[in-house]
Structure formats: structure tokens, C-alpha cells
Image (spheres, grey):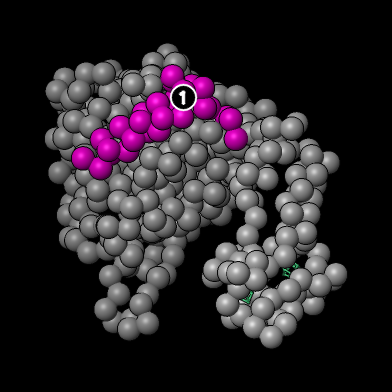
Amino acid sequence: MADLHIDCFDMINPFVIASSPATRGADNVIKSSACKPGAITMRNYGHGMGGGGFFYPSFDAVLKGQPAFHSHAVGKQLPDTMSSLEEYCEEVRRARRDMYPETKLWASVGHYHDIEKYPDWKERWVKEAKEVVAAGADAIELHFNTPGVATASDRQFNYYQLVANCTRMIKKAVPGTPVMVKLAIEDCDCLTSIREAVAAGADAVGPTARWKAFYFDLDWKTTQPRPGSGYGGTQANPLVCFEIADARSRGITIPMYAGGGVFSYDQALRYIMAGSEMVQLGAIACSGGIKVCERIIRQCSEWLDKNGYSSVKEIKGQALQLFNMDNAFAKRRQDKLGEAYRLRDADPEKCIGCGRCTDVCWYKGIELDGKKARKTANCIGCGYCFQVCPTKALEVDAAGILKSAFEEK
Ligand SMILES: Cc1cc2nc3c(=O)[nH]c(=O)nc-3n(C[C@H](O)[C@H](O)[C@H](O)COP(=O)(O)O)c2cc1C
Ligand code: SF4
Ligand code: SF4
């Protein structure tokens, strides 16, 4: 089995079960640790508990690795059973004692709403940091992400300044403990917030995507998701990949733990290939449970085995070669595919004369001659028609051509 261990923070694998109902209090942390993740963030105390989750279109789609989104849906919001720092620290102690011993425990410090609720929020956060560390937390996580950020009634403050000042403040309070800074990718420039956190001494940054959103069925009365904050999903994947790869390409070297829409193993591997060391599991841990998390971890390992990697470290940042293609090479590669499209004519044996190709050609590059499509000299090789042809009468090995450009290089 491929080795999933990662050196930063000495974790048995890259997975961090993110702050959520699945990590609320010691009981849920202990329960979640059964899937043996690298780390678990225990959720903050005192801001309510409960709330359900909802996968659209279905949980089945999630299990098949298809696109899906997740939203907070039904479920009662109860007052949190942990209402004081003392109670939270007791939960940290108990979790640390009884959870899977090789999983690290990250404790949450600070909640966005504290800023609006408590004039002395800074002193409270410093106290929280010191006490959760004394209670046995392996690391601290500061939350500057959604849903906390998005649900704040008013953002009167400067987000970047807040990230920088709080990171500096907490790092000073617990200098020997890793401080993980969880950041939003929405409504801010992610790279700027990463840079601020790094300059302020963060030990890791966690760019995460969850949004305010409004989804509804056309029969809107039967809609399950609740409008507002707390929408996530696989659509986050390319956006978060960009933020990680961008940060890595612009000199950010500290560990990262990317989050958002990791519902299956391939999305997790993509975050690592984009340059993140760790991967958060949020909605999937709450709404999929331990067995699904276990499956994702196992499938990552199986994929690495199948593809000839002996450890997860080998794939870290691999996709940066794609991200950082220089313009000349990117153009050569694109032209290679374009030429293949341009030179390939429709196969008369396979063409059924449906006309979809002529519908999407904007250059008069293909025409129907009776019931058979035929290219003209005007074809520029854009590839539209290849994508819509239902019979593969128009076909080139696009993946092979794109790959060969790297091999030749
Ligand atoms: C029901 C639910 C509650 C959450 N509560 C918190 C929270 O209290 N604090 C926090 O930092 N993030 C919270 N999150 C965000 C997750 O910790 C995680 O960063 C995010 O869900 C990752 O995206 P994903 O759900 O698409 O995997 C919550 C997520 C969900 C689904
Ligand atoms: S889309 Fe394909 S099958 Fe249809 S007319 Fe064009 S080449 Fe023929
Ligand atoms: S490749 Fe583009 S330009 Fe050429 S025939 Fe197809 S759609 Fe038209």
C-alpha cells in the first residue's frame, strides 16, 4: 500500500476532518477518528449545534464521484451543550484521551461572531488558545472562512488586517504550537490573505470554499436547501486548485490544507497535485459519515498503487507543471491539438447526417453533402464539432495528443 504519511505535522495521512457537526465535542471527534484521518478539528463551542445537510442531486451521485453540491438544510438548531471555555477544554482533554491515538487533534479558536458579540474578543481568543493547548490540542485552527465569515451580519473590518493581526496575536500566545489559519476563497483575494497569514507567522493555511447561495427547484416550494450561507460542492474543486497552485507558484512554501467539495478521492488527489499537503473533509464527513471518509482515504492509496507511486509525497505539486506552462509551450501544445482537429475529416462510415456539427461550426468549416458531413478548407480546428458528434464520426485522440506534447518536451 502506498505510504500516505506526510512530514509536516507528522500526520499519518493528509486528511483533516474539518470543523463541523462531525467534530462537535469529544463524542463526535472520537466517532470520526474511527476513519483514522491525519487530523480532526474540534468545532468551536458556544455558537449552536445541529442543522442538517443535503446533497444535490443525491448521495448516490456523490458516491459515484459525480458533480454535486451540499447545503445546510433541515434540522433543529440547539443551544450548544458546551457553553464555556472550561467545558470545551474538558472535551479536548477527553477527545485526546479516547480518540484514535495517531490522529492529531486541532482545536478551534475564535468564532467570527465573537467579534460582533464581545468587546473583549481578543482577550478571549488569547485565553482560549492558551487553555486548549494546555488541555492537549496538537494545534490550533483559526477560522476566517465560510460559513462563519459569510454569516457575520456586517463585515465592518478589513479582512486581511483581521487575518494578520489575529494570527500574530495567537502565535504570540502559544509560540510552540502550530497555528493553522483557515481562509475563505470567496469574497476576498485568497493570495493576499495567504500572504498576510504567512507574514504573521501561520504554520499552515487552509484555503476553503463554501458560499452564500440560493438554489431552488422550479417547483420552488419543495426545495430542500436553505438559502444563505453554507453551500459547498464539487464546483469548488477547480477554484480551490487555482488558489493553491497560484500560491505555490508565487513563493508560498508553508503547508496548506485545502478544502471545499472533496466528496471523492480524485478531488483530494487533485488538491495535493496542485500543491497542498493536506485536504479537508467537511460536508462529506457530516453527510457521508465515517465509512465514506474511510473509503476516500483507501481509494487514494489504491490510486497511488495503481499508478506506480509509493507515497503521496511523490504527487505533491505535480500539476504545477501544467499550471506553469510557459506561453510558447502552451501555444505549441494547443496548436498540436488544433492541427489534429483541422486535418481530421468526418468518417463517412460513421456519419449519420444529423447536422450537429454544422450547427456548431461558426467558420463554414464543415458542410452536409447529402447525408454525409465533409470538412471544407475553412476549418480552423477549433474542435466544437468534435465535441457534439454523437457517433464519433469526428474523433481525434485529444488526451493522447495533449499528453504527447509533454512527452516530447
Ligand atoms: C454543517 C457544516 C458546519 C460547518 N461548521 C463550521 C464551523 O463551525 N467552523 C468552520 O470553520 N467551518 C465550518 N464548516 C466548514 C467545514 O469545516 C469545511 O471547511 C468545509 O465544509 C469544507 O468544504 P466541504 O464541506 O465542501 O468539504 C462547516 C461545514 C458544514 C458542512
Ligand atoms: S455530427 Fe457527426 S454524425 Fe452528425 S453529421 Fe456531423 S459528422 Fe455526421
Ligand atoms: S473544427 Fe471548428 S472550424 Fe473546423 S469544422 Fe469543426 S467546428 Fe468548424
Position above or below: 185 against 153: above
Residue 119: in sight, yes or no?
A: no
Residue 308 sits inside the magenta stretch: yes
Quarter location, residue 134: top left
Q: Is residue 227 visible?
A: yes
Q: Is residue 362 left or right of residue 163?
A: right
Vertical relation: 271 (above or below) 239? above
Q: Residue 303: horizontal and vertical position, in percent?
A: 40, 33
23 sits left or right of 329 in the view: left
Residue 276, position as x, y percentages in the image: 51, 32
Question: Is residue 354 part of the magenta span, yes or no?
Answer: no
Q: Which residues are magenta?
A: 291-319
Residue at 22% across, 64% down? 74
In the picture as drawn, the residue positioned furthest to the top comes out as 176
Residue sitting nearer the eye, 272 or 40: 272
* 97 relative position to 183: left or right: left
Q: Quadrant of the N terminus?
A: top left
Q: Position of residue 73 (x, y in %)?
A: 27, 63
Residue 124, located in which quarter of the rendered image? top left
Q: Position of residue 391 (x, y in %)?
A: 54, 68
In the rendered image, the vertical position of residue 222 relative to residue 100, given as above or below: below
For image coordinates 80% across by 68% down, the residue present is 379
Tell me the residue that label 1 is attached to. 308
Which quadrant holds the C terminus? top right
Q: Amino acid at mark 1?
A: Gly
Q: Quadrant of residue 354?
A: bottom right
SS assignment for the magenta stretch, majority:
helix
Element assignment for label 1: loop
What residue is rendered at 27% in x and 38% in y?
295
